[in-house]
Amino acid sequence: MNTAIPGELKNGFRYYSQFDISANVCGVGIKCGSMHDPPKKRGQAHLMEHMRCRSSPKYVGEQVDLLMEKYMGGPGDDTDINVRIDRASTFFGNNSLLYRRHLVICWDMWVELVLNGVLDVNGLDVEKAAIHQEYFLYGKDVMYNLVDDLIHQVMYDKNPARNRVDCEPGELATITLEQMRQFYNSMYASSQNMFAVILGPQHKEVKRMVERSFDWLPNKGRLVLDIDMSDKFPQLQRIKSLEISRRDIGQYHLAIGFPTRPYLESCKNGDAEALDVLARILAFRLRMKLREGNRNFDQGVYQVLTYTPRTFAHGMIYIWFATKDLEFAKTGEEIFLKECADLRQNLVREEELDAMASNILYNYLDAHIKTPGTLSELIIDAVCNGDEDLTYLNSFRERLSKIRQNRGRIRKAANDYFSLPNYARVMISPA
């Protein structure tokens, strides 16, 4: 299996490659996400992502949209466009294209947009309005995103992970063009805060492509982040709960979780793999009890999902499920807590650990062998959260192997992080 290879220009600009004759993935990443939004300007990083994709002196207006349509498809779910922002990163690029010559064309466009994209009042007004609608379309009105935002807000008091990835509309509306230009100069225009991912060509060819585009970029040194890090791994002293109601839903949505150490810390001490295994075990056990164990037509669940989001400044493990019956939601909460207690006290069954670890390994290998777009996301996640040399990403297979041979390591992680009787919870109920 070919692993991703890091490289670095003389000015500190980093780039990442993996040789694959069938892959054609490229893009420019920024170590900047919603956690970097200035106070009272939540949505600024998202707005910058939108505005950099509009136009440049070389690719004017509609040319950008036509090139995306031609090689990547239009905006939507069925597309190879990979322009997005999360809590810790922004990326301008594409998933795997059909031909290498298409990668070369698209790479030139992404570089131009990121380095020379036009920031003007027209674009500011257009994209503010678009993000305002996105706030509802993919934020407030999509239960997964709403639940994820709320559990982060409940879990933390000060951590910038509380920031919504999309925006806060009232703050978005006040952002000025001059503030956007200042944001670009501080967060984008530095070789230390930008990087490239190009999967497909040989590493030496990737280096030439990157040198032609970025060897002149100034090195402003490490960005000093004005972020409160005191809340990165809170010790819960009580149950932190939020309950809201909505008229437009037909189920009770419940999320429950615990804080964990951030990305790099959890990688260094081996907790990252243990937490991922724990998440899958919990999803499996709750699915068996809440779905397979139910025969009541008005109760039960469709699925139980678990997540382990981690950045350079935060981490958590949480579950989410939905059911039409309030009492069954309460039952699900009780079962979840019992399973957490069981994982703290008892060793997991060998076949259970083997199944969950094997699935996690399969997904890791699949990214490296068959789905370069997924590998690109793993690289972006690693780079923007402290693993710039890909030390922990590339050693994941070996570290996971140690976990699957040590059931006691799973129990230790449960004791380290399942802070019973205290936890964070969000309940969204039908009005």
Image (cartoon, rainbow, N blue to C red):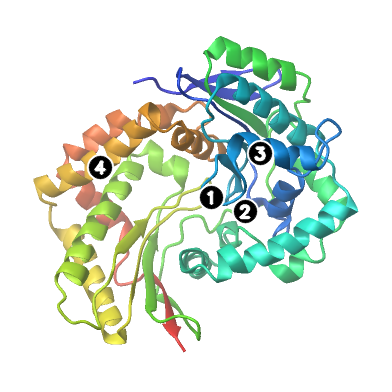
Name the foreground residue: 349 vs 415: 349
Task: Give SS at disc 2.
Answer: helix
Quick check: marks 2 and 1 in contact, CB under 8 Å?
yes
Q: Amino acid at mark 2?
A: Met
Cα distance in 3D space between marks 2 and 1 = 9 Å
Question: Residue beneath label 1, please?
Answer: 313
Image quadrant of residue 206? top right
> CA–CA distance between discs 4 and 1?
27 Å
Q: Amino acid at mark 4?
A: Asn
What residue do we see at 65% from left, 12% from top? 208
Q: Position of residue 73 (x, y in %)?
A: 59, 42
Q: Is residue 29 visible?
A: no
What distance separates the C-alpha of mark 2 from that of mark 4? 31 Å
| Mark positioned earlier in the residue sequence (3 or 2) | 2
Image disc number at residue 68: 3
382 or 259: nearer the viewer: 382
- Amino acid type of the residue that numbered disc 3 sits on in the rendered structure: Met
Q: Which mark is residue 35?
A: 2
**Considering only order in the chain, which callout, 1 or 4, is on the residue closer to the N terminus?**
1
Estimate the spatial distance between the alpha carbons at disc 3 and disc 1, rounded to whole Å: 34 Å
